[in-house]
Image: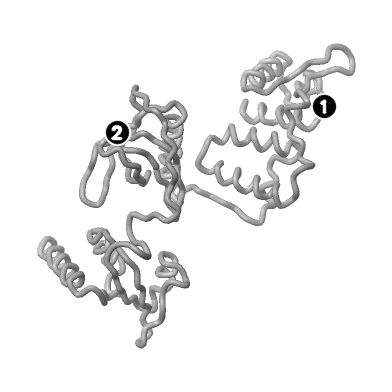
Amino acid sequence: MRLHRLLGILSILLSRKTISAKELSVKFQVSLRTIYRDIKAIEEAGIPLYAIPGNGGGIGIVEEYKLNKTALTGDEINYLMTGIAGLKTIADTEKLQILLMKLFPTDPYIMADLDIMIDFSAWNKNATEVLKQNVNIIRMAIMSNNYLQIEYLSSNRRSNLIIAPSKVVFKSAAWYLFGKSTVNSDFHFYKISRIVKMEIINEQFVPVNAEIPADWSDDFTNDSGEKITLAFDQSMEYRVIDIFGKDNYEQGSNGSIIVNFHCSNRNWLIHFVLGFGINIEIIYPPDLKKEYLDYIKRIILKNHC
């Protein structure tokens, strides 16, 4: 494949001072004409090359372009590799592979030896491909300062929105579009998996720097909304620790798991509680329990045979 050959040529150029086109032709078992086309493609990608004619000459990368890695410690190199390898799972693989080779030309696959692995992809391959496409569209809109038109599913409606995108954010196992809506000029988070349609429109916006809140959540928090107390069955501890963390629950007198938090979205909360079936009990507030039971009755009536 041409991509693999281009990456291989780039790796060699980064690790050696010069190499002749003939050597490259023999190594990759292609014609000299093909090698010259590949060299041109590498130059067009923005990598500065030079050629030394005659015997002992060859093609090389301008020395100032190469990164001096002696300033990086082993741990710093690992941090770079871990981050880049993680981004490769949802971003432009070709560009990131080239970046790896710029940084580590002698061993572009050094990430196999890393003790930490970051993988942003979904377990479902199709979902990963959709995520890659959406992230790419959002990034293109950010770089060109073009508005995005999205169709977005929330808990209570389907909305058609025009968004000035600011950032792509990953937090708590989910990807978000952070941007400003033209409806109210406020910045919001939009879960990318809930965007069912998205396109870049031919209208530009003036970018505005907006800080992402350090502690934000669409669902539950520690200090806003009404106080909620739930009791989970002991068998649900593995799920409770995933959601709330090991320091944010306590053991009840009957072996149950008690969680206290705040929530401002009752509709979300009722569906959250439903997901635990018979393994959860609403302790507080009492009217939430009544609302929850009324909701279950409506489910029974709708599915009654």
* SS assignment at label 2: strand
Q: Is residue 12 above or below residue 287?
A: above
Q: Is residue 95 above or below residue 216?
A: above
Q: Label 1 amino acid?
A: Lys
Could you classify mark 2 by the number of other residues whose Cα lies within 10 Å: few (under 14), some (14-19), or many (20 or more)? many
* SS assignment at label 1: loop
Q: Whole-percent x and y of residue 173?
A: 45, 54
Residue at 47% across, 71% down: 246
Question: In this figure, which residue is indicated by the disc labeled 1?
Answer: 17
Q: Which mark is residue 162?
A: 2
Colour scheme of this structure image?
Answer: one colour
Q: Label 2 amino acid?
A: Ile
Extreme residue toward the bottom, this view: 253
Q: Nearer the viewer, residue 69 or 6?
A: 69
Query: Is label 2 in contact with label 1 (beta carbons under 8 Å)?
Result: no
Q: Identify the image quadrant of residue 153.
A: top left
Q: Is residue 248 above or below residue 71?
A: below
N-terminal label among 2 and 1: 1
Q: Identify the image quadrant of residue 228.
A: bottom left
* Image quadrant occupied by the N terminus: top right
